Image (spheres, grey):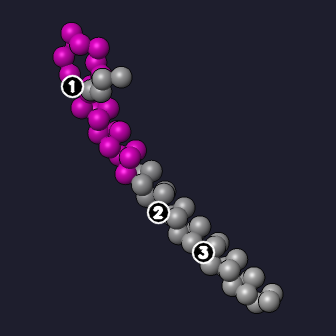
Amino acid sequence: MPVLIIFVLALLLGGLGFAIHVLWWVAVVVLLFWLVGFAVGRGERVGRRGRWYRW
């Protein structure tokens, strides 16, 4: 029984580590898109509010 508990715990921690690693890569990609959008927004006309999104 303790071996089964350790095995399940190892699977959970391994899966969690993989998911966190993937989420870090997703965060990096989103940050890059945000930086590109920020740079594109700088080149817009001055007459507008200077934002490339509509919030």
Q: Disc 1 or disc 2, which is closer to the eye?
A: 2
The residue at 29%/35% (across/down) is 37
* Residue 30: image tag: none
Segment tinted magenta in the rendering: 29-51
Name which of mark 2 and mark 3 comes first in the sequence.
3
Where disc 3 sits, the SS reads helix
Pick whichever, 17 or 44, lies toward us: 17
Can you identify the residue that label 2 sits on? 22
Furthest-front residue in view? 1
Q: CA distance from mark 2 to mark 3?
A: 13 Å
By secondary structure, the bulk of the magenta-drawn segment is best described as helix
Name which of mark 1 and mark 2 comes first in the sequence.
2
Can you identify the residue that label 3 sits on? 14
**Residue type, mark 1 in image:** Gly
Where disc 1 sits, the SS reads loop
Q: Is residue 13 above or below residue 39?
A: below
Pick whichever, 36 or 5, lies toward us: 5
Can you identify the residue that label 1 sits on? 43
Picture quadrant of residue 13? bottom right
The residue at 30%/27% (across/down) is 53
